[in-house]
Amino acid sequence: MVDPVGAKPVTQDRLVAAVARTAPIVRSRSVVQDQAEPATGGGLAGLVAEYAAKPPVDLDRVARVRQAIANHAYPILPETVADRLIAIRLNWKPE
């Protein structure tokens, strides 16, 4: 038989256990901040500015891939392309 949907009465006393006090949270510096501040001089803002100045693309690698495609040396496997397209369409994660 299926239980009805809804609130069920509590049949046991549920006592709340006492919780011990904890030490106050001390704010600490992260490793990223420790390494970024001396190099950029501006902490996180300097790091953001440094990454914003560079394109997020490896231009040397793009040039090598373009050259390989032009020379017909870039390996394109139709089965892999088809599998990835199907995975994208069906929201699968290819292995």
Image (cartoon, helix red, strand yellow):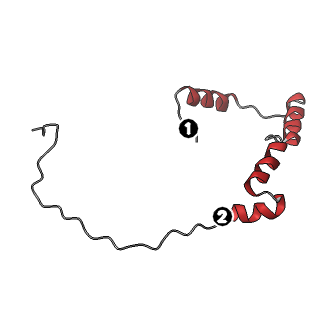
Q: Nearer the viewer, residue 56 or 45?
A: 45
Residue under the point 58% across and 38% down: 94
Position in image of residue 57 (x %, y %): 81, 40
Image quarter (top left, top right, bottom left or bottom right) of the N terminus: top left
Q: Quadrant of residue 7?
A: top left
Q: Nearer the viewer, residue 27 or 80?
A: 27
Which disc is residue 93 wearing? 1
Mark 1 residue crowding within 10 angstroms, few (<14) / some (14–19) / many (20+): few
Residue under the point 19% across and 64% down: 15
Mark 2 residue crowding within 10 angstroms, few (<14) / some (14–19) / many (20+): few
Is residue 78 left or right of 9 when viewed as pictured?
right
Mark earlier in primary sequence (2, 1): 2
Identify residue type, mark 2.
Answer: Ser
- Assign a secondary structure to mark 2: loop
Q: Nearer the viewer, residue 8 or 74?
A: 8
Q: Which residue is mark 2?
A: 30
- Assign a secondary structure to mark 1: loop
Where 63 sits versus 49, above or below?
A: above
